[in-house]
Image: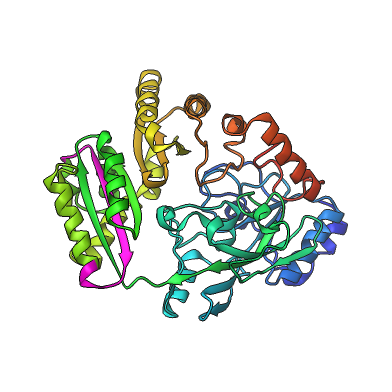
Amino acid sequence: MSDSFISQLPAELNVLTDAASLVRYGSDASGLHAGAPQLVARPATVEQMAALVTLCARHNRKITIAGGGTGLAGGAASDEGDVVISLELLNQIEDIDEAGGTALVQAGVVLETLCAAVEEKGWYFPLDLGARGSCQIGGNVATNAGGNRVLRYGTTRQLVLGLEVVLPDGTIMTMLDRTLKNNTGLDLKQLFIGTEGTLGIITRVVVRLFPRPQTRRSALVGLASFAQIAPLLKAARSALPELSSFEVMWADYVAQAARVTGRAIPFDGAWPLTVLLETEGADTSMFHAGFDAFLESMLENGAVQDAIVPQNLEHAADLWAIRDGIGELFTSLRPFVAFDIGIPLKDMGAFIEQAMTEINQRWPQASNLLFGHLGDGNLHLTTGHLQPADIVPVEEAVYALTGRFNGSISAEHGIGRLKKPFLHYSRDDTQQQVMRRIRDALNPQGVLNAARILD
């Protein structure tokens, strides 16, 4: 990196160059280490960010954008000599509009912090995922994060009203709309949602809020077979219009997640599948009676075999801790592949059967843990205890099968670096060419997050 570039870095960028910081900010939860960055810059204002990006573009310095470091696709893993730009100091909640139900937040705000702040004002931001205590809003938007409540509220894309971004040449583009209706030409913010920082750096976000639910009801139900899932989901959506979560867990996953989180195994492991249902609404007798009646009818007609109904928030949190336990399992599974696949629910059973058959035949030593947001067709399969040489062949096998089922190789985690070689299973040549044209128009030097999504 040239001395002229370093000499022009403003002091207020809070630059870090120590070895520990370079490792920390130059990698993410995927475990990928593509190369050590030269430095980490931490701008505290949008203007500082824009000035830094302008300087990097002028000197053709490559930038890696660092958020909360929770990504599993290698999107925040730097290349050798990169300038890492951390968003952690852009961490202010600038405004909560209590009349209109919107919030204006900087990109480095942690998801859990935002959710707590708006709830204090009587509002609710429904995005929820296991990394809620570490992930940042900017990264959620850049990857179009999904999570546990997509079934009711949609992905992050449906929750964003406006954005401010710094383009690859340092230009600040402000699109901080706070209205639901805006038919004034191209909706340019969509270019930056789900494109993983390859078109611009998200600096501020306007998010849509919802009235805070007065209460939640949840239940964990046991099923004897996968064939029961689709009818149960249909019945739940019909009887519980405020259904927000439908999380399916296989027995091996439940046992392992309960172990690492220190919880008891539900039903003593009696059922091959369990479903965690949650609904949100008004704290009325009608709401509670409707939920109880639904469970009773499902038990009576054999749609479910057993049910656990939490009697308090602490018990409900224990059930959700099992569902969220995958992060604590990763260490014991290395080397592993964490698949994040989208498959139409009508095809999910056949897909799982074929995937498990191939993996078990070719890699009999592998451990497979399955769970997913099956209410929206999102399956998480973690295949661990592999040999390093097995990683790519396992990925190839599962992603090729995903393509044959017309599925998505990434339902919510993004493509990053790790899934880029398999993008063709979900995006054909024409789609990739159009994506490349858009990227090259906005990021012609490849300054921002190079080598992500596309070559």
Would you place residue 65 above or below residue 285 in this image? above
How was this image coloured?
rainbow
- Based on the displayed image, in which of its 4 quarters is residue 418 positioned? top right
Q: Where does the image place residue 283, in percent across and percent down from the top left?
A: 27, 73
Answer with left or right where residue 341 lies relative to residue 289: right
Residue 17 in view in this figure: no
Residue depicted at 33% across the width and 48% down the height: 247
Would you place residue 419 above or below residue 42 in this image? above
> Was residue 351 drawn as part of the magenta stretch in this picture?
no
Would you place residue 445 above or below residue 17 in this image? above
Residue 380 in view in this figure: yes
Residue depicted at 57% across the width and 62% down the height: 160
Answer with left or right where residue 1 lies relative to residue 355: right
Residue depicted at 34% across the width and 26% down the height: 353
Q: Nearer the viewer, residue 106 or 85?
A: 106
Q: Where does the image place residue 442, in percent across and percent down from the top left?
A: 78, 50
Answer with left or right where residue 217 lies relative to residue 335: left
Q: Nearer the viewer, residue 249 or 404?
A: 404
Residue furthest top as drawn = 361
Image quarter in which the C terminus is found? top right
Answer with left or right where residue 245 lies relative to residue 108: left
Q: Where does the image place residue 208, in percent across and percent down from the top left?
A: 53, 67
What is the span of residues highlighted in magenta in the rendered image? 270-286
